Image (cartoon, rainbow, N blue to C red):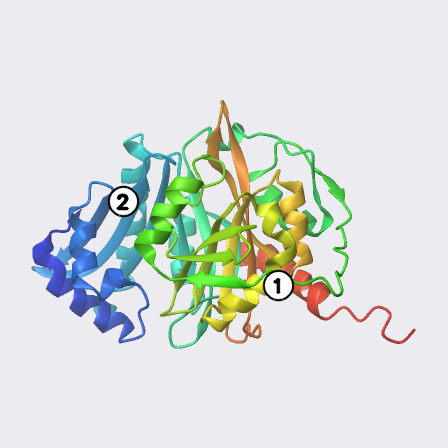
Amino acid sequence: MFERASVEDIDELLRLYRKVYGRAYALPLGTDPQVMAAEITSDRTSWLVARDNGELVASIVGNVEPADRLGKMQGLVVHPEHRGGGLAQQAVSSLAELILSDGRADSVYGTARTTSTAPQRVCLRSGFKALGIFPNLRKAARHETMVLLARHQDGVLEQRHPVERVPASLGPLLDAVDKVVGLPVRPELVPDAEVPVRRGEPAPEVELISAPRFVLRRYNEQLTNADRRFYPFHTPNVLLAAADGSYEVFAHLSGNDGYCTLIGANPDAMAVARHLDLLIEQLNDYGAFYIETLVPLHAFDELGQLLAHGFLPAAAYPAMRRDGELFRDYVVMARTMQPLDFRGLAIDAAFQPFTEQYIEAWKQMYLNTRGVFR
C-alpha cells in the first residue's frame, strides 16, 4: 500500500501536514517545498506515502547516514479520517523494515509525541524499544516533551563494549535500559564529582558566529576524528569561540523552536567543561530553550562535567555506533531552560522508568535542600 513519494506529491503533502498540524508544525519536512523536494530526491531518504481512492492519506520519512550506519524515522502523519485502521503502524513497520533490510543501517530511531500514547504504541508494536524522554524538546504550540525509541538489527545489541564505571547519577537511567535491552556488564557507580567554584577567575569572552557555511567548513577542518564528530543527522550552524582562542564549540541552533545541540568541541570537550555555564547563558540569550549533547557511555570525565553543570541524563542509545568489532552505547545529556510541566503528559508505561528517573534527577539537581536548615 505504501509507495515512494515523488516531487509531484509535494502540494498534497503540504495540505496533509497542514490538515493535521495546522500552522504549529516545526519541521520543514511538512512546511518547506524546497526542503521536501531535496529529501524526496535524495538517495539517503525513503519517503513513503499511501493513498486511498487516489487521495494521499499518510506519509512517513526515513533517512540513513551510511557512514554512521544509522537510520532515522520522522514526519509520520495520517489523515484524521483514516486513523484507527492500522495505517500508522503499517507506515512505521514498512519504513523500519525497508531501512534495516538493505544492509546500510544497524539501527533506526525515532521520536514520538506525548500528546497521546497512540504514536508511542504504534512504534512499540512495530519492534521499537523505549529508550528515554526529551523534556521540553521542541516548541510547537508549547514546549513539548518527546520520547525516544529505536529498533536494531538482529544480534546488534548482543555485540556491545562493556563499560567499567559511570557517574552515580546515571545509575537510574541504566536500570531502565537494563530492563529494556540489558547491559553487557553492570558498570561501577562512582559518586559524582563536585566541580570547585573558581572565584575571581575571569572567563574568556565568548563570540557567537552564525554563518552556517563558514561554521561547517571550520568544523570539517578542525574535527577530523570520527569519535569527536559523531552526531548523526546534525550539522553545526553556529560556532561559539573563546576570544582568547582557547576553545571552539560547534552547535546546531534552531531559531524556530529553541532546540540546540552541542555537536563537537575543539580541541576537546574537556577544554570547554569549566566554561559550560557561560556557554549555556550565551546560547539562551540567542534563543536556545533546550540544549542537548550526545556522549559515549564510557566517557566518564565528560559525563561528570556535564552533570556538574546542570545537564541530566534523559535517554540512552545502546549500540549506537560501531567501534571495531563491537558497538558503543551513548547517553543523551539534556538541559532545559524552561520550567518542567508534565501536566497532561500521555505516556505509555514502557517510558515510565525513564520519566521517573529524569524527574528524580531534576529534583536532586534543582530542589536539593540538604543543609538549608543547618
Rendered view: 21 above or below 70: below
Q: CA distance from mark 2 to mark 1?
A: 44 Å
Q: Which mark is residue 369?
A: none
Q: Which mark is residue 277?
A: 1
Q: Secondary structure at mark 1?
A: helix
Q: For this view, does 98 lie left or right of residue 356?
A: left
Residue 113 placement (x, y as % from top left): 41, 63
Residue 325 placement (x, y as % from top left): 49, 22
Kind of residue at disc 1:
Asp
Residue 31 placement (x, y as % from top left): 22, 66
Kind of residue at disc 2:
Ser
Residue 116 placement (x, y as % from top left): 42, 67
Residue 74 seen in the current view? no
* Circle 1 Cα neighbour tier, 10 Å, few/some/many (<14 / 14–19 / ≥20): few
Q: For this view, does 113 lie left or right of residue 163?
A: left
Q: According to the image, label 2 marks what residue?
A: 94
**Which image quadrant is residue 94 in?**
top left
Rendered view: 251 above or below 174: below
Rendered view: 85 above or below 298: below
Q: Residue furthest right?
A: 374
Rendered view: 66 above or below 259: above
Are discs 2 and 1 less than 8 Å apart at CB?
no
Q: Residue 211 or 314: which is nearer the viewer?
A: 211
Q: Residue 224 or 26: which is nearer the viewer?
A: 224
- Tell which circle, 2 or 1, labels the residue nearer the N-terminal end: 2
Residue 84 seen in the current view? yes
Q: Residue furthest top?
A: 325
Looking at the image, is mark 2 or mark 1 nearer the viewer?
Answer: 1
